[in-house]
Amino acid sequence: MQIDLDFADRHVVVFGGTTGINFGIAQAFARQGARVTVVSRKRENVEEACAALGQFGGQVNGVCADVRDFDAVGRAMAASVAAFGDIDVLVSGAAGNFLCEAKDMSSNGFRAVVDIDLVGTFHVLRQAFAHMSKPGGVVLNITAPQSSIPMRFQAHACAAKAGVDQLTRVLALEWGPAGLRVNAISPGPIAQTEGFKRLIANGAGNSGDSNANVPLGRLGSVDDIANLALFLASPYASYISGAVVSCDGGGALDSVKPTLEAAGARATQTNA
Ligand code: COA
Ligand code: NAP
């Protein structure tokens, strides 16, 4: 279920917006009447996403670019602005991840993920600033619980997403006076996504069973995240900036799970 908020004729640019969670965000804005630009590396993903977004009847543009390439991001931004005008909502969500123990990870493997998630986010925001609608523009970075919860086999993504959170806060400080709001969304485990398949479904979280780790007892949906994006980009959130907002059913609160046995052992010691 998606909420209704009016984004008619607003220009929304979604980096990494051709699949998964970010595509869900692009779709939600298209449904609300926005002109939507999606950007990612693979032409087939861009074409497929544009065809699907076009079904909502609004204007859609797709551009191929790798967020690791600063100049390519600049060209994508310029093309999107030439087509649809200044950017009202910018979503930076391109990311990569794979599981690998740090002792086995190559320098290039670590760098690939940091370059996509963190340096890529800097590239996207840096190239967008001149083209953001001011005042009133909104930036949404897509981070992850890894930014504050250490997760085994994800040294690269943990480091990169921690950087994304701090980038969010620093740019909220620097860009607030220009009338821009900068926030981040931290999704929990989202069903039927690449990230979920790669990481959580095969037990990479701190304790494997993803449903058991969520106090609300279910996986998230792409719509859960899209609804938060619509809200944060809307006037209802006009005093929210510099926030990293979790949308995870409470999952980030539950990263450490003591067993009843362990709790009992501590109680026994206290009474002794
Ligand atoms: N285990 C260990 N190392 C791996 C790996 C794995 N599963 N997958 C890639 N690497 C290493 C490669 O070996 C290479 O290092 P090397 O040159 O020292 O051998 C380095 O990472 C870069 O790999 P490459 O395939 O050239 O990178 P890429 O730029 O084509 O792709 C990735 C980037 C690796 C992040 C790729 O998984 C990707 O494109 N992911 C996007 C989708 C995604 O991850 N979605 C989930 C988001 S949460
Ligand atoms: P996904 O479907 O793999 O989405 C990643 C998107 O980024 C794709 O559109 C991909 O398209 C694009 N992309 C990847 N590398 C790129 C690059 N170098 N330059 C430009 N675009 C690039 O993954 P997802 O699971 O939906 O994740 C989306 C976001 O949510 C990510 O930021 C992820 O960290 C975050 N997240 C996901 C979960 C989850 O449960 N899935 C949980 C927490 C956080 P191309 O391949 O065409 O480039």
Image: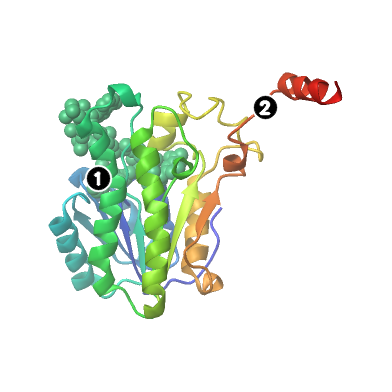
| Ligand 1 positioned in quadrant | top left
Residue 30 visible in the displayed image: no
Q: Which mark is residue 115?
A: 1
Q: Nearer the viewer, residue 109 or 195?
A: 109
Percent of width and height locating residue 88: 36, 72
Percent of width and height locating residue 81: 22, 71
Percent of width and height locating residue 15: 30, 55
Can you say whether 175 is above or below 258 in the image? below
> Measuring 62% from the left and 30% from the top, which residue is drawn there?
212
In the displayed structure image, the side of residue 111 where residue 235 appears, left or right: right
Label 2 or label 1, whichever lies nearer to me, is: 2
Q: Nearer the viewer, residue 33 or 72?
A: 72
Mark 1 Cα within 10 Å, few/some/many (few <14, many 20+)?
many
In primary-sequence order, the first of circles 2 and 1 is 1
> Measuring 46% from the left and 67% from the top, which residue is drawn there?
233
Mark 2 Cα within 10 Å, few/some/many (few <14, many 20+)?
few
Mark 1 Cβ and ligand 2 under 8 Å apart: yes
Q: Which mark is residue 258?
A: 2
